[in-house]
Image: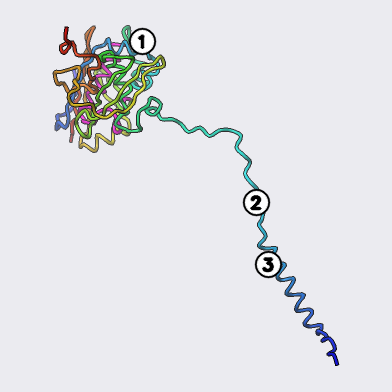
Amino acid sequence: MSLSLPPGGILVGLGCDLIEVERIRGVLDKHGDRFLKRVFTEEEQVYCNSLKYPHKHYAARWAAKEAVSKCFTTGIGEHLHWTSVSVYHGSRKEPLVRLDERAGDLLRTVGATHVWVSLSHTDTHAMAVAALLKHG
Amino acid sequence: MADAPQQRSPLARAGWLVGVFALAWIGFLFLPMRRPQPPESSFDVVVPTSKLRAVGLPDNPDLEGLPDFFEVWASRAEWRDERTEFAYWNPAAKDYSYTFEATRTPEGYRFRPIPVPDPAKRFLDEVIDDDYPIRFYRTLPDPASRRD
């Protein structure tokens, strides 16, 4: 088995978030499309909608965006929009983060080179941990 | 004996004529010209309303995520006459110094900036937990303060 993990680095920022999946389901039921378009990227919507319980996966991605915003200490606002952070999956189904240009600028500003996330959820809660690292 | 009228020489008369023509030409040059006017617009200019202004918020980039956070956390609020008050995290000040009133309408939530409420006004979540982007104020009478 060949595994390749990132070669260490300096931890620049750390953030986590926990959310009740029911909250996200409630908003999806009430404001579905408008909310989805404002908060989640196209690739996130395609992925979540392909699964049996989309709201749980949306909740995990909501938590990921919040966790990343906490890493940067900016919150969601001028420097980081909801859709600036997009979670997708690598070849081993590990969650990876794609940043838009705005968030990329922010990453360089804080002196980091990579963002790593880890997601998890149960039937009732979803959580995410995010870290900003400087490699090389 | 009256003097005979003086006769102008033909040269002087020609000079007068040239002068009159020159003045007429200059006057013509300075006549206001009618410039072609652009056709009147047949449609109204629509100034786009920002996403924030559309829901009553000022155009402050810090508030970009507020409507979505609010939708997710609105069920924690205490509503009185379809209104509630809350404080929103200000990342620059690192405190909850943005304060708003939200109104619940059939079309969705509308917001209005309000002055920071009296410090005696209590948050619903008494246990300080600055993990939440939004903290709701108590809008119903505090059950503990009621007298029977």
Residue A14 in the image: x percent, y percent?
Answer: 17, 27
| Residues behind callouts 1 and 3 on a single chain | no
- Chain of the residue under the numbered disc 2 shown in the image: B
Label 2, residues with CA under 10 Å away: few <14, some 14-19, many ≥20? few
Identity, as a three-letter code, of the amino acid under mark 3 = Ile
Residue that badge 3 annotates: B26
Q: Secondary structure at mark 1?
A: helix
Colouring chosen for the image of the structure: rainbow
Q: Where B38 falls versus B135 (above or below)?
A: below
- Chain of the residue under the numbered disc 3 shown in the image: B
Residue that badge 2 annotates: B35
Residue A127 in the image: x percent, y percent?
Answer: 21, 16
In three-dimensional space, the C-alpha distance between marks 1 and 3, rounded to whole angstroms, equals 78 Å
Identity, as a three-letter code, of the amino acid under mark 2 = Arg
Residue B119 in the image: x percent, y percent?
Answer: 18, 26
| Residue range (magenta) | A55-82
Q: Where A59 falls versus B97 (above or below)?
A: above
Instruction: Name the magenta segment's main secondary structure.
Output: helix
Label 3, residues with CA under 10 Å away: few <14, some 14-19, many ≥20? few
What's the residue at 32%, 21% (across, down)? B102
Identity, as a three-letter code, of the amino acid under mark 1 = Asp
Whether B89 is among the magenta residues is: no
In the rendered view, does A12 fall on the left or right side of B72?
left
The residue lying toward the viewer, choosing from A84 and B105, is: B105
